[in-house]
Amino acid sequence: MTTTLASPARMEKAAVAALGMLAVSTGALESVVAPTLPLLQRELDMSPSEGALLNIVLAITGTLITPFAGKLGDRYGGKRVLIRLMAVVSAGGLVSALAPNLPVLLIGQILQGAMVGALPLSFIVVRTHLPSGASKAAIGLVSGMFVGGSMVGLLAAGPVAEAFSRHWMFAVPTFAVIGFTLLVNRLMPSDPPGRPDDAGLDWPGLLLLSGILVTLLLVFALAPEAGSQPLVFVALIALLAAFVAGWTAVERRSAAPMVDLRMLARPVIWKSCVVTFVICLGTAMGVYLVPQLLDVSGDGYGFGLGATEIGFVLLPGAVAATLAGPLGGIWERRFGSRAVVATAAVLMAAALLALAAAHSEVWHIAVGKALIALANGLCVTAMVTSIASSVDAGDTGIATSLVLVTRVLGSAVGGMLGGTLLTSGTLPGSEVPTESAFSAGFLIAGVVAVLSLLVVRTMSKGVKE
């Protein structure tokens, strides 16, 4: 039996503009940590491992929330869920702004992670209230403004933190998020809820996967001091194994699993997951190590740059990431997914190995970071397109969720491995990691990227006829 819903009200241009400005605000709030991470580490007395955790926790929690946000939007209406998620983001921004120490700041970043699920919800709302052509233009506008907001945050966070304080670099975009959320709530028409999903939500799967990620981060954070606390380290390893076993059992038995592990048996899926893990590991290493290298002033290495200057050096990478999506789509249609993924892996390996060998000039860092960002965008675009065209339409969501989880794991491992290397590479009595720690991080990630080509060469070409 088909349920007929009333036609939703049309969305006016003012509502689209408000949604776009909300995207700018959330993009700015999302990007303030990257250029100011060294400053935050000094002010909050963080170790490099703790800085790596702060650098990735927003993305991890956001990725966990995203698949559930879509389901909740389908069930209860996109606008209703969007506004509530943005309320969580606003609370997270205020907690981050007022945070006196690292634990409170981490709580704020966890709450801010809801913004990752809010962006796809805005696309659902736009498609509900606008005709096909207008909705595509609006989605492009919102996406572009989110990226534009990220660049604003990247450039403005340093000057705001240095001129006022770190508190204001979170507070200013948070106030904008609150204001534009209220405006969107007033201007955007409500969309009707969809049909209930009898299978429900996989809350046990979400909680267990969260436990896996949190425990994995703790393992990496404690790794440099494992020799002094062996029992705690072994206990964490055992807890991690228990979470993995429990999550595997729950997902295999769930009627609507968060991640359908049975699909991993398909070559196109496991190969995509392997390559995605490697590329995201390299990206996370670069995202973490590059600002640290720009900040330190070592004996013959490092640059001693401030947060404002770091933001400008990172800007080419943000531009490259913006261009990577469209380029990846065009190249995938013309040359096939395998060619695009191979190109991304080569770019990633070349950039990381080059940074391991040469990082004495600022332009070395800027170019290397831009190539890393470009490779990441090309790979993710090609992987999503490859999976979408290789599985049944009904399996697309399940297959892409596997890649999504793999992306989070790769980012978590890469970021925390970078932090672990810098922590273990900091000599007693010194606050500056050795140059060899930076070189080792870039080298390890580069070698892993090279090895991924062994998997890439076995993938289907994926050329569209």
Image (cartoon, grey):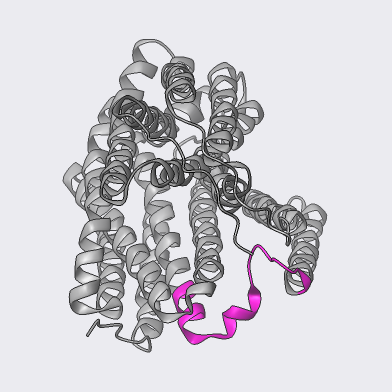
- On the question of residue 24 being in view, the answer is yes
Check the image and report above or below for 100 versus 217.
above
Check the image and report above or below for 444 versus 138.
below
Where are the magenta residues, as a range?
253-274
Residue drawn at x 47%, y 20% as measured from the top left: 186
The verdict on residue 268 being magenta is yes
Is the stretch drawn in magenta largely helix, strand or loop?
helix
| Residue 289 placement, left or right of 428 | left
Query: x, y percentage for residue 292?
Result: 39, 40
Residue 356, quarter of the rendered image: bottom left
Residue drawn at x 62%, y 23% as measured from the top left: 101
Residue 250, quarter of the rendered image: bottom right
Query: x, y percentage for residue 297?
Result: 33, 34
Query: x, y percentage for residue 77?
Result: 57, 41
The verdict on residue 23 being magenta is no
**Farthest residue toward the top?**
164
Residue 187, quarter of the rendered image: top left
| Residue 35 placement, left or right of 181 | left
